[in-house]
């Protein structure tokens, strides 16, 4: 895997890409435990454009995008849940085509940098 890895903050301009990635990633991840109806309901509920925009703007969820070369391959989101430095990880997904090692290496490094910058003491 020689392509350049980029992990950057996501914006509302990335909503369509996040929705597309979720619809590609979720079936491979959850098809063993959710029926197709449940899967579609949850994707429609949590990943429709209005829901994602609300998470980003009203609920103050911080999103990042992960790119391999110029191809979006993953995303994550989290939010602060109190004033004592505790954060909640809401989403952490990477496309099956990249393999686990990609995100473990790059996503973990980026997450630790963010946690230090925001003085995160505990992740919930």
Image: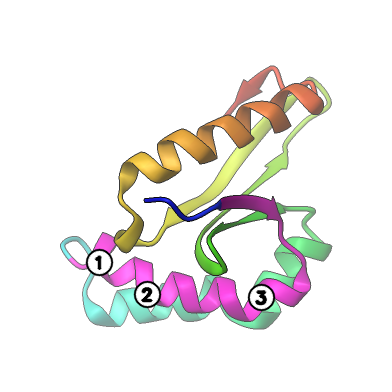
Tell me which residue sits at (71%, 63%) in the image: 55
Q: Residues within 10 Å of mark 2 (few under 14, many from 20)?
A: some
Rendering coords of residue 56 (x, y %): 76, 62
Q: Residues within 10 Å of mark 1 (few under 14, many from 20)?
A: few
Give the colouring mode of the picture: rainbow
Occupied quadrant, residue 29: bottom left
Image vertical order of residue 65 relative to residue 28, above or below: above
User: Which mark, residue 28?
Assistant: 1
Predominant SS along the magenta part: helix
Rendering coords of residue 107 (x, y %): 53, 40
Secondary structure, mark 1, is helix
Q: Assess whether residue 4 is covered by the magenta stretch.
A: no
Asked if marks 1 and 2 touch (Cβ < 8 Å), the reply is yes
Q: Which residue is mark 2?
A: 24
Q: CA distance from mark 1 to mark 2?
A: 8 Å
Asked if marks 3 and 1 touch (Cβ < 8 Å), the reply is no
Tell me which residue sits at (36%, 67%) in the image: 25
Image vertical order of residue 110 relative to residue 17, above or below: above
Q: Assess whether residue 14 is covered by the magenta stretch.
A: yes
Occupied quadrant, residue 42: bottom left
Rendering coords of residue 59 (x, y %): 77, 57
Which residue is outermost to the left? 32
Q: Which residues are magenta?
A: 5-31
Rendering coords of residue 10 (x, y %): 71, 61
User: Which mark, residue 123?
Assistant: none
Sequence-first disc among 3 and 2: 3
Q: Which residue is mark 3?
A: 15
Occupied quadrant, residue 114: top right
Q: CA distance from mark 3 to mark 1?
A: 21 Å
Task: Name the one closer to the observer, 90 or 65.
Answer: 65
Task: Name the one closer to the observer, 6 or 96.
Answer: 6
Q: Residues within 10 Å of mark 3 (few under 14, many from 20)?
A: some
């Amino acid at each position: 895997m020689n392509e350049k890895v980029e992990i950057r903050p996501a914006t509302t301009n990335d909503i369509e890409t996040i929705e597309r990635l979720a619809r590609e990633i979720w079936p491979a991840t959850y098809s063993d435990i959710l029926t197709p109806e449940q899967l579609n309901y949850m994707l429609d509920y949590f990943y429709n454009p209005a829901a994602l925009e609300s998470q980003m703007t009203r609920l103050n969820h911080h999103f990042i995008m992960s790119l391999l070369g110029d191809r979006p391959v993953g995303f994550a989101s989290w939010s602060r849940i109190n004033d004592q430095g505790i954060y909640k990880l809401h989403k952490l997904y990477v496309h099956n085509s990249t393999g686990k090692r990609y995100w473990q290496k790059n996503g973990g490094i980026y997450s630790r940098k963010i946690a230090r910058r925001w003085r995160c003491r505990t992740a919930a």
